[in-house]
Image (cartoon, helix red, strand yellow):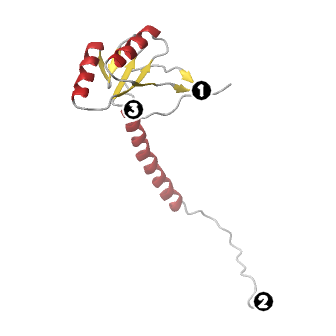
Amino acid sequence: MAGGMFEDDEGITGINVVPLVDVMLVLLIIFMVTTQFVQDDLRNRMPPNIQIQLPKAVSAQDTNPGLLSLVINSQGQLFLDGKPSNLAALKERIRELQAGGHKLDAILAADERVSHGSVVNVIDTLRVLGVIDVALNTKRQEID
């Protein structure tokens, strides 16, 4: 038949995998780069050497870390901006920042197993020194 269907008795016997490999390599590179950015972001928010277990709250929201990042671990140790500290060093740092004219905000992450009095003591110290905006870091909890 002239102009009829093209008849080819041979079927497709092989699959060209080169485009598939190219796409997979590009995806691998994208995931590697993205993972590095996510790890850097997490390192900036919470130093990896401080292990705490945040309490859960239904109303928890993502917050931007303030100028002062405070952590109280399960042993009751205080960390200021990722470094071991105490209340005297915290007071000194606040006075330095106030002398520089900075608006002071604080975000406090405390392990759920630490005593309530320790958390209140840190918050009270912050407020006495003029740090009024203190946010408590929590983990989002699903509503049952």
Tell me: residue 80, above or below residue 2: above
The secondary element bearing badge 3 is classed as: loop
Q: Nearer the viewer, mark 1 or mark 2?
A: 1
Tell me the residue at 45%/50% (across/down). Answer: 30
Q: Of residues 73 and 23, which is closer to you in this image?
A: 73
Residue at screen point 36% across, 26% down:
69
Relative to residue 139, is residue 32 depicted above or below?
Answer: below
Q: Check disc 2 and give the amino acid type.
A: Met
Identify the residue shown where x is 46% and y is 25%: 137
Judging by the rendered image, the residue that carries numbered circle 2 is 1
Q: Which mark is residue 58?
A: 1
Q: Residue 3 sits in which quadrant?
A: bottom right
Whole-Å distance between the Cαs marked 2 and 3? 77 Å
**Real-space Cα separation, disc 3 to disc 1, in angstroms:** 20 Å
Q: Which residue is mark 3?
A: 65
| Callout 3 amino acid | Pro
Q: Position of residue 45 (x, y in %)?
A: 39, 32
Upstream in the sequence, badge 3 or badge 1? 1
Q: Assign a secondary structure to mark 2.
A: loop
For residue 40, which quarter of the picture? top left
Q: Closer to the N terminus: mark 2 or mark 3? A: 2
Task: Tell whether 7 sits left or right of 67.
Answer: right
Residue type of the residue flagged with mark 1: Val
Furthest residue toward bottom:
2
